[in-house]
Image (spheres, rainbow, N blue to C red):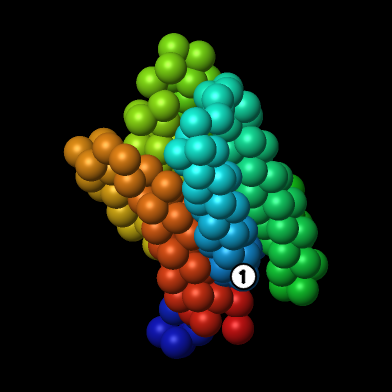
Amino acid sequence: MKDQDIHAELSSIRDLMERSAKFISLSGLSGIMAGIYAIIGAALGRMVLKEEWAALARNHYVDEYLVIAKLFFIALAVLIFSIGTGIWLSIRKAKKNGQPFWNTGSKRLLVHMAIPLVSGGLFTFILIYRGYYGIVAPATLVFYGLALVAGSHYTYSGVKGLGILEILLGLLCALMPGYGLIFWAVGFGLLHIIYGTVMHFKYDK
């Protein structure tokens, strides 16, 4: 057997192992759409806050819990749309490439991301319950970044870089209280769009 044939065979085996161990059907377009949803959500959140501040200026009583509820449902809608779009686009990519969407790699990715995401979600609810609203934005960014880093071993390596940026942005957000919505838009919006665009042209073509 020629050296060229051996290298081709080894490359084929390595590619097969990667396909079985990693989730490589993650769509770059899903990152772009998630970023767009996040920016829209941040704009809606800004409108809600601006409306409540205007009401305060007119000496009207504003129920703080009502404001938090509005922001929560906006964030929940962004999350649902992002996950739904991500699953749909990834399934479409998997079918296009003749690969199973639900495989060992996707299961491992889900498990390893779920631990910091669920922990972060519960921690965020505790912060809201205790009234520590100023820490909510940095906490969500940090825990989301940790989830990306944890799951990066089972998908594209670029996910780890995005996770580190999210963590750093969350820590910076904690140092600059009052700008949580802006950091949220940058972290979940702009970074996702940039990452998704790079991943789309690198892997989706």
Say what secondary structure mark 1 lies in. helix
Q: Give coordinates of residue 153: x percent, y percent.
A: 43, 48
Amino acid tagged 1: Leu
Instruction: Choose between 135 and 203: the one closer to the eye.
Output: 135
Please state if 106 lies on the left or on the right of 139 as rendered. right
The answer to whether residue 2 of the structure is visible from this angle is yes
Vertical placement of residue 121 versus 148, above or below: above
- Residue at 56% x, 45% y is 51
Mark 1, residue position: 29
- Residue at 64% x, 43% y is 74
Vertical placement of residue 173 versus 157, above or below: above
Q: Give coordinates of residue 167: x percent, y percent.
A: 31, 44
**Mark 1 crowdedness (10 Å alpha carbons): few <14, some 14-19, many ≥20:** many
Q: Give coordinates of residue 20: x percent, y percent.
A: 61, 53
**Total count of labels:** 1
Q: Residue furthest top?
A: 130
Q: Residue furthest front?
A: 58
